[in-house]
Image: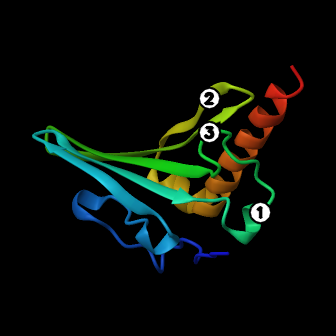
Amino acid sequence: MMEYPKLTKDNIKYHEDKLINFSEFGYKCWQTDHNDMGRTEKWQVRVDNQERFKDVPLCETNDKVHLNIDAGYLLINGEGYTNYTFSITQEANEIWCDLKLYSISEDDIMKIGLDEFEKRMVELWKCNYFLHYTV
C-alpha cells in the first residue's frame, strides 16, 4: 500500500499561477484549463490502496475510491485568488453521491492539513455509504 509525505510549509511546491502541486502526495493532475481570467487544475488520488484508509468501502461501480481536488486560480483586477475543492463521487446501494468540501484556501490546507482534509472526505464517504445501507 502507498503512503505519501505530509504537506508542510517546508515541502510545499507550486504549479503555475501559485496552485499547490499535489503530485508528491500521490495525486495525478488529469486536466488543466486556462483562460484570460485564470487557471484550473483537476487532481486525483486513489485512497483505498493506502494503509490509513484500508477499511474504506469501495464504490460499487468502480471497485475503488478516488479523492479529487479541484484547484482554481482567478485573476481579478490584478489580484490573484486561489481556492480548492475536495470531493468524492461514488455509488452506494445504487445511489450516486457527490460529496464536497469547497472554497478552501491554501491557508486552510496548511493550517488544518492535507491529510486531515483527506481523512474528513473519507469519513464523509463512509457515513454516506453506510447510510445508504440502513435506509
In the rendered image, residue 32, in percent from the top left (x then y), is placed at: 25, 51
Residue sitting nearer the eye, 78 or 121: 121
Q: In this view, does 20 lie to the left or right of 4?
A: left
In the rendered image, residue 12, in percent from the top left (x then y), is placed at: 43, 73
Residue sitting nearer the eye, 80 or 135: 135
Comparing labels 3 and 1, the label whose residue is closer to the camera: 3
Q: Mark 1 points at which residue?
A: 54
Q: Where 47 sits versus 135, above or below?
A: below
Q: Where 135 sits versus 127, above or below?
A: above
Name the kind of residue labelled 1 in the image.
Lys
Name the residue at 70% across, 49% down.
Answer: 122
Residue sitting nearer the eye, 8 or 52: 52
Name the kind of residue labelled 2 in the image.
Cys
Nearer the N terminus, badge 3 or badge 1?
Answer: 1
Q: Where 28 sits versus 81, above or below?
A: below
Mark 2 Cα within 10 Å, few/some/many (few <14, many 20+)?
some
Mark 1 Cα within 10 Å, few/some/many (few <14, many 20+)?
few
Name the residue at 74% across, 70% down.
Answer: 51
Name the kind of residue labelled 3 in the image.
Thr
Nearer the N terminus, badge 1 or badge 2?
Answer: 1
Q: Residue furthest left?
A: 36
Q: Mark 2 points at which residue?
A: 97
Q: Is residue 100 left or right of residue 131?
A: left
Q: In which quarter of the image is the N terminus?
A: bottom right
User: What is the number of the mark on residue 61?
Assistant: 3
In the rendered image, residue 21, in percent from the top left (x then y), is placed at: 37, 66
Residue sitting nearer the eye, 82 or 55: 55
Mark 3 Cα within 10 Å, few/some/many (few <14, many 20+)?
few
Tell me the SS state at disc 1: loop
Nearer the N terminus, badge 3 or badge 2?
Answer: 3
